[in-house]
Amino acid sequence: MSNTAFVSTAIPYVNAKPHVGFAFELVQADAVARYLRLIGRDCFFLTGTDENSLKNVRAAAEEGLTTRELCDRNTEFFKALLPGLNISNTEFIRTSSELHTRGAQELWSRTKPEDIYKKHYSGLYCVGCEDFYSEKEAEDGKCPEHKTPLEHVEEENYFFRLSSYEEKLLELIESDRMRIVPASKRNETLSFIRGGLLDFSISRSRKRAGDWGIPVPGDADQVMYVWYDALANYLTALELTDNSERLKKYWLECDKRIHCIGKGINRFHTVYWPAILMSVELPAPTEVFIHGYLTMNGQKISKSLGNVIDPLVQVEHFGVEAVRYFLLRAISPFEDGDYSESRFHDVFNADLANNLGNLARRIETIGEKAGHVPKPAATPEAPEGYHEAMEDYRFHDAMAALWAVATNLNQRIEKVKPWALQKEGKKDELAVFLDEMIAGLGIIGHWLTPFMPGTAERLQSMFKEGKAIKRGDPLFPRLK
RNA sequence: GGCGGUGUAGCUCAGUUGGUUAGAGCAGUGGAAUCAUAAUCCACGUGUCCGGGGUUCGAGUCCCUGCACCGCUACCA
């Protein structure tokens, strides 16, 4: 077992501002990375932006910017999300960067020659959209967007010979050498592969791509298809080109290589990507964790509905810690979940203010009055079921285990009645009781780190060894 | 159409290989307590476990069937 780990998010398109959906993924991946560090692994945590897309070319044109200008500007919105959500990424990769470009070309060049071939691609093309439509999408051969007749266009593209990887992929997944979580998504992938794999296009004409993208090595008329290049980010960020120490440490010799992705891009990560890696003789990821989508007050989040919420506005409103708590605890990691302010409000008051926040306050007050000084403590053991939950990406269950500790402490307070001990002058008994309480809060303060690093830190400093307890501000003031 | 999944208390969901009075959290009602952010603690659920058949001594849990919703079904980060 190596003591390193690699964790990544998917890289979003930058043609629009980030919304809560991506914040959800960032926070989950961050919890994974922070957890791995907490148990002693040196974790490389990667996120970034996908910029070589025709969508970006178009979005830029609409705004009268160059594609580069649009990408530079919008990438900042995504970067701003990271400190805002307290994300502990170690690297941020932009696919329009020089490092990525070189790396993606290197990946292409290393691909087995027999796995890449040139083939005619034909389809229905809309000049207005500069895009192809399938016959299903195009009613009566007309563009669904422009309602104009589509042209039949033929083009030569490079294809990847995915068809020759069926058996190897099945073996990889069935053996769980690449573990897909949850099982329902694993089944989806397996049945997709069993249905037979077709080769897929990995390039397009430079012209059709709007002269934007990564040139195919040795063919100036072709750029890489955005999917091929986007997937490469995981390795280009590790300095694939230079065969670096990073690559060795966090991929080649690392036994935890985790991708966190949304359900819509399962196939790309569990079929195409491992096949590409096999062709270049690099190891596949060891785990792919697939999360669901968020809805907003029960509705799909979309621009047209006008219910796109900016995660940073939420953070401003409720604080990072509360936003992270809600996303990780109140929403299933695997199923679609609903983000509603009324539920947020309820969960905030019940769990954060009333339970944990009030508990910490009670102990602080009692401790301060008693003039208590916490003793040094060893790293506390995690509650029952916590590690198992984390291994399976059941963040909500791991947190439930932590909150059960808080509930127990509240119950103990009622039973022992420390205020009575104080009145009766039973100092020793009170001190023993306070040590018990502080030990309990120490468990929470330590193991809460992956989810709510700020709160974990505050809890730890509240009851720091050798420092007399002094009441501070409440952790989570109740919401009205 | 094909393959797969879901449907359990007002809400969000747990329910191992079928086994006693079906559970948790939140919300609600009543009480206790006063260290605390009117927070906490205790007590309280007559739920057609989607409908209908069936297997079984016994089914939320297995089989068949009907209904509703969802996912995948090839180039959408």
Image (cartoon, coloured by chain):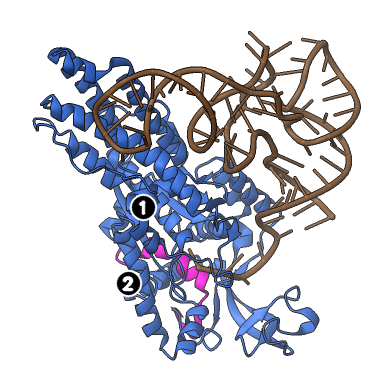
Chain colours: A blue, B brown
Quadrant containing the N terminus of chain A is top left
Q: Which residue is mark 2?
A: A99
Between discs 2 and 1, the one toward the N terminus: 2
Residue A264, image x, y percentages: 57, 59
- A464 in magenta: no
Q: Residue at x 17, y 27 (%)?
A: A367
| Res A365 seen here | yes
The disc labelled 1 sits on which kind of residue? Trp
Residue A55 versus residue A251: which sits nearer the camera?
Answer: A55
Task: Tell me which corner region of the image, top left, top right, bottom left or bottom right, holds residue A451.
Answer: top left
Task: Tell me which corner region of the image, top left, top right, bottom left or bottom right, holds residue A93.
Answer: bottom left
Q: Which residues are magenta?
A: A217-243
The disc labelled 2 sits on which kind of residue? Leu
- Residue A40's place in the image compared with A114, above or below, is above
- The residue carrying pointer 2 sits among few (fewer than 14), some (14 to 19) or many (20 or more) residues within 10 Å by Cα, namely some
- Residue A160's place in the image compared with B52, above or below, is below
Residue B35, image x, y percentages: 24, 28
- Residue A451's place in the image compared with A228, above or below, is above
Q: Is residue A82 left or right of residue A439?
A: right
Q: Is residue A210 left or right of residue A299?
A: left
Q: Which residue is mark 1?
A: A251
Query: Tag 2's secondary structure?
Result: helix
Query: Tag 1's secondary structure?
Result: helix
Residue A139, image x, y percentages: 78, 79
- A234 in magenta: yes
